[in-house]
Image (tube, grey):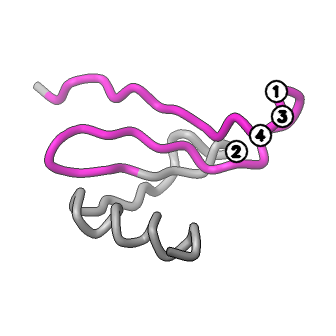
Amino acid sequence: MTPELNWTKSSYSGNDGPDCVEVAAAAPAVHVRDSKDVNGARLTFAGASWGRFLAFAAGR
């Protein structure tokens, strides 16, 4: 049985629109989906890869 994922979206995303990605961490992976299509395709990253992406996106 697959556990339910706890999806989170950015605090910068408004509550009045679904234009955002959502992220769920479930060790050892991080899952990403489009908030407009919660049943659609998901991207799955290894935790270390996600950490490198975040550092890159933050410009560090």
Mark 1 touching mark 4, by CB under 8 A? yes
Q: Which residue lies furthest to the right in this view?
A: 16
**Vertical relation: 41 (above or below) 12:** below
User: Magenta segment: does it hold 13?
Assistant: yes
* Label 2 sits on residue: 36
Which amino acid does the dot numbered 1 rest on? Answer: Asn
Q: Which of marks 1 and 2 is nearer the N terminus?
A: 1
Residue 15: numbered disc: 1
* CA distance separating discs 3 and 1: 4 Å
Frontmost residue, 36 versus 53? 53
Q: How crowded is mark 1: few (under 14 residues within 10 Å), some or many (20 or more)?
A: few
User: Picture coordinates of residue 57 (x, y %)?
Assistant: 56, 71
From the image, state whether disc 2 or disc 4 is nearer to you. 4
- Residue furthest front in the image: 60
Q: Which amino acid does label 2 sit on?
A: Lys
Instruction: Check residue 39 for magenta coloring.
Output: no
Classify mark 4: helix, strand or loop.
Answer: loop
**Distance from Cα at disc 2 to Cα at disc 4:** 13 Å
* Residue 3 position in % (x across, y down): 20, 24
* Residue position marked by numbered label 3 in the rendering: 14
Q: Which residue is pictured at 31% across the width and 59% down the height?
A: 44
In the displayed structure, would residue 2 be above or below residue 30?
Answer: above
User: Which residue is pictured at 47% across the width and 31% down the height?
Assistant: 7
- The amino acid at mark 3 is Gly
Regarding mark 1 in the picture, which secondary structure is present there? loop
Q: Magenta segment, which residues?
A: 2-31
The residue where tag 4 is placed is 13
